[in-house]
Amino acid sequence: MLYVIIFEYPEARPLPVISPYHLASALTDVVIVWKLDRLARSLRQLIDTTVLLNERGVELHSLTENINTTTPSGKLTFHIFAALAEFERDILRQRVNAGLKAARRVEEYALLLCHAPW
């Protein structure tokens, strides 16, 4: 049984040195990570990596979130976290777009005041 352990300092960004295909090699049985965000840089990459690991029979354990994707409850927890992260990203995108739109309106109003004929 071969364990691949990915530990990084929590504040460090995940390094793309280990590809999902290397993690899911025939020699690997378990991948252990400190947090799920240490395994991938984006939600899409995290889900793709997890699916690839599951297809090849490799277990994924996250120590901080206490997730084990080999159990039904672990899979459920993983997908709930993934859905919440995607929801949070979409809400953030909406807020940024609304803020940009409001800033454009303020700028247009300020330009109108500057060129007003009084």
Image: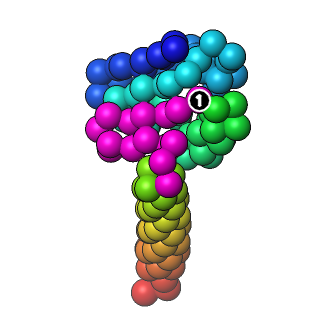
Horizontally, is 108 left or right of 25 in the view? left
Q: Picture coordinates of residue 16 (x, y %)?
A: 56, 20
Q: Residue at point 48% right, 48% down?
A: 71
**Disc 1 residue type?**
Val
Q: Return the x and y of residue 2 as percentages of the image width and height.
A: 51, 13
Q: Residue at x 44, y 50 (%)?
A: 74
Q: Give the range drawn in magenta.
A: 58-72
Q: Is residue 36 above or below residue 43?
A: above
User: Which sits in the foreground, 47 or 13?
Assistant: 47
* 73 is within the stretch colored magenta: no
Q: Is the image coloured rainbow, by chain, by secondary structure, or in one colour?
A: rainbow
Foreground residue among 28 and 82: 28
Q: In this view, does 48 lie above or below 96?
A: above
The residue that label 1 is drawn on is: 58
Where is 105 relative to 53, above or below? below
Residue 78: x and y, percent? 47, 51
60 in the magenta segment: yes
